[in-house]
């Protein structure tokens, strides 16, 4: 059995341990938030790259044909039918990005990656303002495959 002084000493060290534990937990929570933020940024950067690759890979003999091919490529990339009003609206808003990519890919001296970035930022801001979430969240939609059944 401890006397009053020893009990107070142990309590003081226990308080220090609790303070250290709380500091560790707070740091772990902040780090988890930061890691989650960086994880989203990384995922969206790769999705942005996939989008630009789809737009750059869609070609045509002229601008109109290239833009139509890009629409099809984006529709396929996201897994849309391309027939709903919302999908049509989004694809219409994305068209300036596609045009900038096409002009850049064609070697247009005035068009460059800066123009693509600018148009993409405008589109991303429009989408987030309109729908309340980042455009690249659309890439999170997973299609559940139906099992094949033999009869």
Image (cartoon, rainbow, N blue to C red):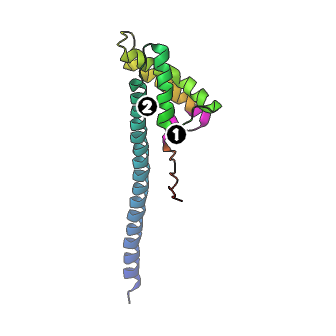
Q: Quadrant of residue 53?
A: top left
Distance of mark 2 from mark 1, alpha carbons?
12 Å
Main secondary structure found in the magenta portion: helix
Position of 150 relative to 130 (above/below)? below
Residue found at the far bottom of this picture? 1
Q: In this view of the protein, can residue 97 be seen by the observer?
A: no
User: Residue at horizontal 40%, vertical 43%?
Assistant: 38
Foreground residue among 59 and 87: 59
Give the position of the C terminus as an image quadrant.
Answer: bottom right
Q: Quadrant of residue 56?
A: top left
Foreground residue among 1 and 80: 80
Residue found at the far front of this picture? 151
Q: Tag 1, which secondary structure?
A: helix
Residue found at the far right of this picture? 85
* Residue identifier under label 1: 138
Bounds of the magenta segment: 128-139
Coordinates of residue 127 in the picture (x, y in percent): 56, 31
Q: Tag 2, which secondary structure?
A: helix
94 vs 50, left or right, is right
Give the position of the N terminus as an image quadrant.
Answer: bottom left
| Total labels drawn | 2
**Circle 1 residues within 10 Å: few <14, some 14–19, many ≥20:** few
Q: In this view of the protein, can residue 137 be seen by the observer?
A: yes
- Residue 134 falls within the magenta-colored stretch: yes
Mark 2 vs 1: CB contact within 8 A: no
Position of 129 relative to 147 (above/below)? above
User: Residue at horizontal 41%, vertical 53%?
Assistant: 32
* Residue identifier under label 2: 51
125 vs 15, left or right, is right
First along the sequence among labels 2 and 1: 2
- Residue 47 falls within the magenta-colored stretch: no
129 vs 4, left or right, is right
């Amino acid at each position: 059995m401890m006397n009053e002084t020893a009990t107070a000493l142990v309590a003081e060290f226990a308080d220090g341990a609790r303070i250290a534990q709380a500091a560790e937990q707070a740091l772990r929570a902040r780090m988890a938030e930061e890691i989650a933020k960086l994880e989203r940024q990384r995922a969206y950067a790769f999705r942005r790259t996939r989008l630009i690759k789809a737009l750059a890979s869609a070609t045509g003999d002229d601008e109109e044909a290239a833009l139509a091919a890009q629409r099809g490529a984006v529709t396929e990339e996201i897994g849309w039918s391309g027939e709903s009003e919302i999908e049509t609206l989004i694809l219409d808003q994305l068209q300036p990005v596609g045009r900038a990519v096409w002009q850049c890919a064609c070697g247009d001296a005035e068009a460059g990656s800066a123009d693509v970035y600018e148009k993409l930022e405008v589109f991303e801001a429009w989408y987030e303002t309109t729908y309340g979430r980042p455009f690249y969240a659309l890439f999170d939609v997973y299609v559940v495959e139906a099992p094949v059944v033999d009869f």
